Image (cartoon, rainbow, N blue to C red):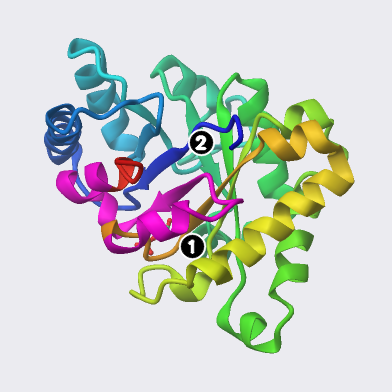
């Protein structure tokens, strides 16, 4: 047993407009309430596109929901001439509590480096929100057998110079790229191997207290059918869920993995 509260995080990616977002959040809240969900046993987080966040905030506040929400990316700048970017201040004003950075899709399509990802995480933490720092290897790296070193390299580069206290406040999401959106889930043992190695590296670099409190999520075709097995692994504290988070019932079922 550990003190880490499990986290079920739904990464909607570029799906659902603000009306559909309202609908999904209401449906999710209803499904969780009907099932008698205990939020102290699993935190529930939705991560919609920027344009949906204001609507999600309105629903969450009006209905006083325990569901948390956050953003898929953020700028490292405070304000100014950065066309298309969104600042941490804008997100905190909307009540966001989490921000994802370094998702493999942003690393691949927007050239995000480990250093930029680390700077985003720093910015988010300084703004009082929780960073969800993503890492994960491509298929060639997995085949070459160097996936553990690769992933630890990504994390160490992003968190270079961080204090143990700050690292304890972040969430790390391990998402093997070959398992994202492919229906190809890493086996629970594959996922545990890397999540366990991440925790061991945190222990080595930042000490026991940090290693024992930092939450590590698995992501990549996580769904109702495999969530219990994933959550049974010693070093997996939750999931970052894409496809299966777009349906209220399936995501609610995942949040209730403990039931
Ligand atoms: P998936 O996406 O669950 O659809 O595989 C996970 C993610 O990319 O966060």
- Residue 69: which quarter of the image? top left
Q: State the residue position of label 2.
A: 99
> Looking at the picture, how far across and down is residue 213, in whole percent?
67, 33
Asked whether residue 160 appears in the rendered view, the answer is: no
Check if residue 249 falls in the magenta segment. Answer: yes
Callout 1: helix, strand or loop?
helix
The magenta span reads 225-253
User: Residue at the spot x=49%, y=62% of the render?
Assistant: 105
Q: Mark 2 Cα within 10 Å, few/some/many (few <14, many 20+)?
A: many
Q: Mark 1 Cα within 10 Å, few/some/many (few <14, many 20+)?
A: few
Of residues 105 and 155, the one nearer the viewer is 155
Mark 1 Cβ inside 8 Å of ligand 1: yes
Check if residue 6 falls in the magenta segment. Answer: no
Mark 1 and mark 2: span between their CA atoms?
Answer: 15 Å
With 20 as the anchor, is 207 left or right in this view?
right
User: Residue at the spot x=43%, y=36% of the render?
Assistant: 71
Above or below, 20 against 93 in this view is below
Of residues 139 and 5, the one nearer the viewer is 5
Of residues 226 and 70, the one nearer the viewer is 226
Callout 2: helix, strand or loop?
strand
């Amino acid at each position: 047993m550990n003190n880490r509260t499990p986290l079920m995080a739904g990464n909607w990616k570029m799906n659902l407009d603000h009306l559909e977002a309202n609908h999904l959040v209401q449906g999710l809240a209803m499904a969780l309430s009907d099932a008698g969900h205990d939020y102290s046993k699993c935190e529930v987080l939705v991560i919609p596109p920027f344009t949906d966040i204001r609507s999600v905030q309105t629903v969450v506040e009006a209905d006083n929901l325990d569901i948390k929400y956050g953003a898929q990316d953020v700028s490292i700048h405070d304000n100014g001439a950065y066309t298309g970017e969104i600042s941490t201040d804008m997100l905190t004003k909307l009540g966001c509590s989490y921000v994802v950075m370094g998702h493999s899709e942003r690393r691949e399509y927007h050239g995000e480096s480990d250093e930029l990802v680390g700077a985003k995480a720093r910015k988010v933490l300084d703004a009082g929100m929780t960073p969800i720092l993503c890492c994960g290897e491509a298929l060639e790296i997995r085949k070459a057998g160097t996936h553990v070193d690769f992933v630890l390299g990504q994390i160490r580069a992003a968190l270079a110079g961080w204090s143990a206290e700050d690292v304890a406040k972040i969430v790390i999401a391990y998402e093997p790229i070959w398992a994202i959106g492919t229906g190809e889930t890493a086996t629970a043992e594959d996922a545990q191997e890397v999540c366990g190695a991440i925790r061991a590296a945190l222990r080595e670099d930042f000490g026991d207290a940090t290693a024992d409190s930092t939450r590590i999520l698995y992501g990549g075709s996580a769904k109702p059918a495999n969530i219990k097995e994933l959550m049974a692994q010693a070093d997996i504290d939750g999931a970052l869920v894409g496809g299966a988070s777009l349906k209220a019932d399936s995501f609610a079922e995942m949040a209730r993995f403990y039931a």
